[in-house]
């Protein structure tokens, strides 16, 4: 039986028709935010509380990265037992120039990462249980 593909952070990204982060755009001043769960505009000169869903750039440049060598505390669920280190990338989005964090797919070697390289958004497994495969966005080097 195949597992149900389930978004681990619904409303923050989609995998249809292609992997895309969903930001929130202020309807008054057009400021963009990610994650999208905003209750008020963080622009100090704007009093708006209305936002619309706004798809963000799918590409960007690697701004910084690090390796997570220890399992983060709950509610983090380790995708592998025993815990295996994974890389986390901070990517500056091509159009918006916002920096968004994301894991790097496990198949990518840390040595392959280089600040300034082109990265693209992918959707990949975060972890699985008996019925579901939970999906999250990740940053993958453009090859
Ligand atoms: Zn605003």
Image: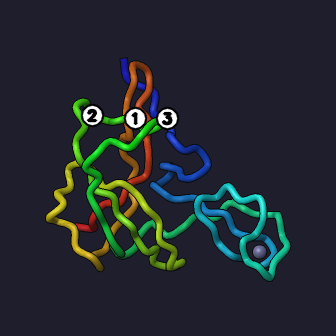
Q: Earlier in the sequence, mark 1 or mark 3?
A: 3
Residues at marks 3 and 2 touching, judged by CB atoms closer than 8 Å:
no
Q: Is residue 123 above or below residue 43?
A: above
Q: Is residue 74 above or below residue 98?
A: above
Q: How far apart in space, not on screen, are marks 3 and 2 (Cα)?
A: 18 Å
Q: Which residue is mark 1?
A: 77
Q: Which residue is mark 3?
A: 6
Q: Where is residue 6 drawn, in percent x and y?
A: 49, 35
Does residue 96 appear left or right of residue 68 in this picture? right
Does residue 16 appear left or right of residue 49 in this picture? left
Q: Which residue appears farthest toward the right when viewing the image?
A: 47
The quarter of the picture where residue 45 lies is: bottom right
**Which numbered tag is attached to residue 80?**
2
Q: Where is residue 77 drawn, in percent x and y?
A: 40, 35
Residues at marks 1 and 3 touching, judged by CB atoms closer than 8 Å:
no
Q: Secondary structure at mark 1?
A: loop
How packed mark 3 is, by other alpha carbons closer than 10 Å (few <14, some 14-19, many 20 or more), is: some
Q: Secondary structure at mark 3?
A: strand
User: 68 or 14: which is nearer to us?
Assistant: 68
Q: How far apart in space, not on screen, are marks 2 and 1 (Cα)?
A: 9 Å
On-image quarter of the N terminus: top left
Q: How far apart in space, not on screen, are marks 1 and 3 (Cα)?
A: 15 Å
Residue drawn 59% across the image and 59% down it: 35
Q: Is residue 76 above or below residue 111?
A: above
Residue drawn 79% across the image and 71% down it: 27
């Amino acid at each position: 039986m195949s597992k149900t593909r389930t978004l681990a952070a619904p409303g923050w990204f989609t995998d249809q028709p292609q992997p895309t982060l969903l930001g929130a755009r202020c309807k008054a001043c057009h400021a963009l935010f990610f994650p999208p769960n905003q209750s008020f505009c963080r622009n100090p000169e704007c009093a708006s509380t209305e936002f619309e869903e706004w798809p963000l750039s799918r590409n960007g440049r690697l701004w910084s990265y690090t390796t997570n060598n220890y399992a983060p505390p709950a509610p983090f669920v380790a995708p592998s037992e025993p815990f295996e280190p994974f890389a986390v990338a901070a990517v500056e989005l091509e159009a918006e120039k916002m920096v968004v964090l994301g894991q790097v797919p496990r198949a990518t070697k840390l040595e392959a990462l280089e600040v300034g390289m082109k990265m693209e958004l992918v959707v990949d497994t975060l972890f699985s249980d008996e019925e579901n495969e939970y999906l999250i966005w990740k940053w993958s080097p453009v090859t």
